[in-house]
Amino acid sequence: MKKFLWVSIGVGVGVLATKKYAEVKSGAALNRQVGKYADRVAEYLEAFHQGMTSREEELRSALGVDSAK
């Protein structure tokens, strides 16, 4: 019975390893990671732009300068 347990655990680990290897070899994992990082960078740049615009408006109103847009 113990041997059957260990064999089934070995088969399960082998199947998971094979799936992971196929995913890495196909590039799907890399594409997902690059997509996540690209989304994070885009979110950061959007937040930076919003903060910059907000601060520019504060400075313009404090200095009494009209918007030159």
Image (cartoon, helix red, strand yellow):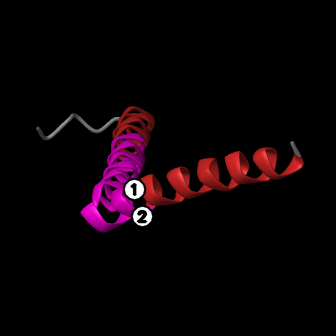
Disc 2 residue type (three-letter): Tyr
Judging depth in this view, the residue of 6 and 12 nearest the camera is 6
Which residue in the rendered view is the most extreme toward the bottom? 25
Q: Which contiguous range is marked in magenta?
A: 21-48
Name the residue: 37% across, 37% down: 50
Check disc 2 and report its element: helix, strand or loop: helix
Which residue in the rendered view is the most extreme toward the right? 2
Quadrant in which the C terminus appears: top left
Quadrant of residue 61 within the rendered picture = top left
Number of numbered labels in the structure image: 2
Q: Is residue 64 above or below residue 12?
A: above
Q: CA distance from mark 1 to mark 2?
A: 16 Å
Disc 1 residue type (three-letter): Gln
Foreground: disc 1 or disc 2: 2
Check disc 1 and report its element: helix, strand or loop: helix
Quadrant of residue 49 within the rendered picture = top left
The residue to which callout 2 is attached is: 21
Give the side of residue 34 with respect to residue 3, left or right: left
Quadrant of residue 64 within the rendered picture = top left
Judging depth in this view, the residue of 36 and 65 nearest the camera is 36
Residue 33: % across, % down: 39, 56
Name the residue: 40% across, 35% down: 54
Residue 33 circle label:
1
Mark 1 touches mark 2? (CB < 8 Å) = no
